[in-house]
Amino acid sequence: MIKTASLKVSMLTIQFLTAIVGIICLGALPGLFNGLSIDLNGYLQTIKELTIKLTSPLSLTYSVNHQVSRPLFPEILIRYKESLMIFIGALLLSLIIALVIVYLMFLYQKVNVVVKKSFIILESLPDVLIIMIVQLLVVWFLKKTNILLVNIAAAGDQKVRALPIICLSIPTTIMFIKLLSLRVEEEILKEYALFANAKGINRIGVFFKHILRNVLLSFFFFTKTNIWFMLSNLYIIEYFFNSIGIFIFLKDYNTIEIFTVSLLLIYIPIFLYIQIFNLFTSKLIKEVS
Amino acid sequence: MWGLFFKQKKVWVGLLFLITLVTLSIGNTVVNDGEIKRVSFLYDDKGQLMGAPFPPSTEFLLGSDRKGYDLMHLVIEGAKWTIGVGVLITVLRIVLGLIFSIILERTPSKLFKVIEAFFDSFSVVPLTMIAYFVLQHVLVFANGSTPDPFHERVGFEIIILTLFAVPTISFYLTNEIKLLFKNEFVGAARVLGGQKSHIFKKHIAPHLFPIILILFMQQFIQVLFILVHLGVLKVFFGGTIVFFDGDIDSVTHEWTGLLGMYYLSFTTHPWIPLVPIIFFTLTIVSSNLILSGIKKSYEQSKIKPFKKNLYTSNIKRQNKEFSFQPIKMNLSKYR
């Protein structure tokens, strides 16, 4: 038991370290290209310098207009927190909306048919189009009624959160509905659901007490594709709303060090989340499926 | 598989849209020499002079941009670039991914795990971010003295957008190939003395083909999404790429350029950025229609023989005998 656990931990550390080496190699990529030609020596040099710089993270700086240099560390964390707020807000909002819609799909056959038919079009909406439509709607509403529902874009240090969260949650909700409805359909066919139905428990009870638990467990076992999808939408949304998240920070001051640090900041929590979730629930998931 | 594929209406809708768009676009270059209708000034109903941009009207079906170019015409002219570049990048991605996955399939599992961990960040971090970062750095270098020639910049962008997706694709394909190798018929072929290359050609490849087809459409859609993102971030294909204090213009009239140039003014002239983005959406919708058509016919082709042999024959026979009449049973022999 202890032996297998220690083996697992050592495997994980090896995975983690190689992933970090990968990120450093990725971050140093601009050193590989000298103009449009390839410069291998320069690349190795850049990797070396980058690693040395990363060993003392507190001394890293970023410069505004190549003049003033400020310490990177508290600043990037503040930006990071802002992105995280939007990400988590959108995640929770879209999860709630998706659950409600999936529940309606479960109850009424009509909703089920309509939602499924519109999937192909809904899925294909680029996030840029969604953002534009939402912004146009807010402006149109402002012109009609003179009430500004939510702030459209940030100026200076102002924070906009409501609209980015709404915009991010629209494509995410569509994706969640697709995943959840597929899972619910799988679960309904299983014997325990049939048994609960046969015992006379009403549909609401079956859904919330039995099906939802199993669905959510496998749902929170996020695949990387979902996170990837959400993050790439978040990148564009931050750019559109000029919010002060980490992606905009990265775009404005894109030096090699800042890129690598932000990559690490984004990657490490996701890696930990997936691994820890894997560790604790792999048994449960096996039992369910 | 193909019989069912072409029987679906949605597939035809998607195919027709894409084919018409590309044919019109190529036709415009061949017949019309790539000329685009341009009107700088117009008289409105009251006889007053109006300058471009014009909103959608009978004269301009989708309106015009600020230089007076007809947007409908522009979008059609640009279609072949955008769709062509998308297809090119997708093909390159799949070919490279397939080559690497065949190599990776043969590497020992411990080494494979290390390689997978090395490229793990690629599957989490948005490709737009990486592509923008790398491209921008290169462009800053190129901007110093003289910009590199057009075809080199485009080639570089294509290479970047291809290479960064290859790891994820090849890991996916490796796992699919590994699953296929676990099939019983592969074991049978091996027992009969088939070499690995023979098994791959004769037994794996036919099963891999539909998977690659589905992957192709998915990747095509993903490439279109990334092109939209890069367009918004002002990194265009073919045209001028971010110059610090110069005009931003797209030489080839491809869609991302239109989008990137005008999206900032979309509250005042909403139709200008909306036209290219709607055409993007239509392209993605039709690709999705084709994709779901492929998926459906693939699943059907998998299920078919199984159903016929096992179930239907038995069920039919029972149905004939069934009736609501009370059954007369001779119980005497049980007594």
Image (cartoon, coloured by chain):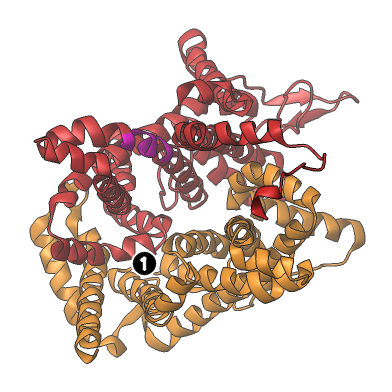
Q: Is residue A93 left or right of residue A231?
A: right
Specify the colour of chain A: orange
What segment is highlighted magenta in the picture? B207-214
Q: Residue A7: say if magenta.
A: no
Amino acid type assigned to the residue bearing label 1 in the image: Asn
Tell me, yes or no, if residue B172 can be seen here.
yes
Locate residue A154, reporting x and y percent: 64, 70
* Residue at screen point 84% across, 26% down: B44
Q: Secondary structure at mark 1?
A: loop
Task: Provide the letter of the chain coloured red.
Answer: B
Residue at mark 1: chain:
A
Tell me, yes or no, if residue A163 can be seen here.
no
Locate residue B258, reporting x and y percent: 55, 38
In which quadrant will I find the N terminus of chain A?
bottom left
Instruction: Name the residue beneath numbered marker 1.
Output: A254
The one nearer the camera, A152 or A15, is A15
Tell me: residue A22, above or below residue B272. Answer: below
Q: Quadrant of residue B314?
A: top right
Q: Quadrant of residue B312?
A: top right
* Residue at screen point 36% across, 67% down: A254
Q: Is residue B32 left or right of residue A178?
A: left
Tell me: residue B83, above or below residue B128. Answer: above
Exactly how many numbered labels are in the figure?
1
